[in-house]
Image (cartoon, rainbow, N blue to C red):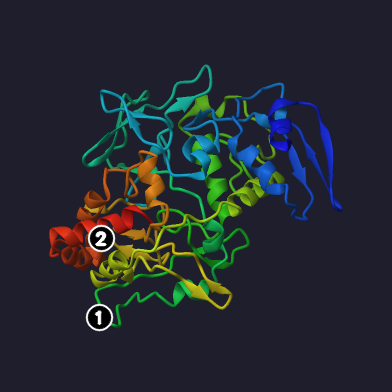
Amino acid sequence: MLARLLTQTRLLTQISIGSGVVLCTLGLARAETTQTPLDAIIGQSLFERVWVSAPASTKATDGLGPLFNARSCAACHPGGGRAEISLSAQGDIIGPGLVARFTQEAAQGDPFYGRQLQSSAVQGRDAEGKLSLQADGVHVKELTAGPLHPHTHVSGRIAPQLHGLAHLAALDPEVIAENADPEDKNKDGISGRVHWVRDATGGQQAGRFGWRAAHPSLTSQSAEAFLIDLGLSTSLFPSPAGDCTTAQTACLESPHGDPTVEIPDSLLTLIIRYLENLSPPKAQADSRGEALFSATGCAACHIPRLVQKEGAVPPAYTDLLLHDMGEALASPALHKEVAASEWRTAPLWGMGQAIAQNSTFLHDGRAATIRQAIDFHGGEALSARQAFETLSAENKQILLTFVETR
C-alpha cells in the first residue's frame, strides 16, 4: 500500500509511525532518526525511483545528470541483484550495469571525461560516448569530444549484487584485520592487506565495499554511486554536476537540482535501510565441492565465513582484503595507496543468481563464465589456479558447480 502510494501520488501525505513521523511524496521522504519497519519499504521506493533532469515540477525528484549512466539505482541493480549484461549485434553494451572507468597512474581520472564514461545525458546535452565488451574487457567508442588522454587507462566496472551487505557492514574491523598478512609472514604466498581509508570525520576505517575496498560503509559507497552513475549530489559528494570536469563547461552550466544537495541525508538513510534488509543469498550444502574449494587454496582468500563475537556472517566467501591479482587484471586505481594489480576479494555469494540474470564476472565483466574468471587469476591467486588446473575433469566440474551455485 505504501509503495503504491509513494509511486502514484504527488500529494504530500503525513504518516504517523510510532513516535516518529514520515513525510512522503513521490519525490520526498523525510524520516525521524528513529528507525521503523516502514523505512526499508520507503527506501525501496527511492531505490527504484526514476530521477529526472532539472528543472522539474517535482523538485525532490530532479537533478539527474547532466551526464549519467542510469536513471535509478535499480537500473544497475535489478531487485538488488547483479547487473544484467546484454550486447547488441555490434557488441555494444545495452543498459547501464557495466561502465567504463578512466584512470591514470597519478590516481587521477581523464582530464576531460573524468572518472567514468557517462553514456547518457539530459535533453540538450550529448552523452560522452558508447562502450563495448570484448574478450579483453571494456572499450569506449564514438567519444563525442575527441579521444581520451593518451595516458588514460580504460577498465570496466560491473554493478555487483547487494544482498547481505548489512552483515559485511557490521563486521568489526579487527575481524577483517586478523586475516591480513601484508608481509606474508607465514610464507604461503598470500599477503592480503586491509585498505584503511579515512571517513568523513577524518578517522581511519577498514574499507570493505567497492572493487578496491575504498568505502568503509554502505552510506559512502551509495553516495559515490549517486554522484558518478546518476550525477546526483549528497552531503558526502556535494558536486551537483556529478563527474563533469572543469573542461566540460556545457555540463557545468546545465541546470541542476537543489543547490545544497540533490539527495539529502534523510533520503540516503532510507535507501541504506532498504539495502540493509536485503537478505543474504542462500546456497545448499555441497561437501564435495567445499572440500575441493578448500584443498585448491580458493578458501584462503574467499573465506567462507567471517566470525566475530556476535556470531558468523552467512557464507560470503571473502576476506574483504586487498590482494595482488597479477598483471592480467591490473588497472590503475583512483587511490594512491592501492597498486594497479590489487583488488578486494569479491564475495562469491549470489553467483547462482548472477548466472540466472545473464551477468558476467570479474570487476570488468570480461569473463562470461566462472571458468574464464579463474583463468585470469594470477599474483597471490596463481597457486590456487594452478591447483585447479591439476584436478581431474570430474573434480573441476564439481568445484565449478560449487562456485556457480553459491
Q: Amino acid at mark 1?
A: Lys
Q: Nearer the viewer, residue 142 or 87?
A: 87
Quarter of the picture containing the C terminus is bottom left
Quarter of the picture containing the N terminus is top right
Q: Residue furthest top?
A: 124
When the figure is inspected, residue 131 is found, relative to residue 154, above or below; the finding is: above
Is any part of residue 269 visible from this angle? yes
Which quadrant would residue 154 be assigned to in this image? Answer: top left
Residue that numbered label 2 is attached to: 399
Q: Residue furthest bottom?
A: 186
Q: Nearer the viewer, residue 356 or 133?
A: 356
Residue that numbered label 1 is attached to: 187
Task: Give the foreground label among 1 and 2.
Answer: 2
Mark 2: few, some, or many residues within 10 Å (few <14, many ≥20)?
Answer: many
Answer left or right for 135 relative to 250.
left
Answer left or right for 17 relative to 352.
right
Residue 253 picture location, percent across and down: 57, 26
Residue 177 picture location, percent across and down: 45, 74
Q: Residue at x 47, y 32 (%)?
A: 69
Instruction: Decide which of tag 1 and tag 2 comes sooner along the chain.
Output: 1
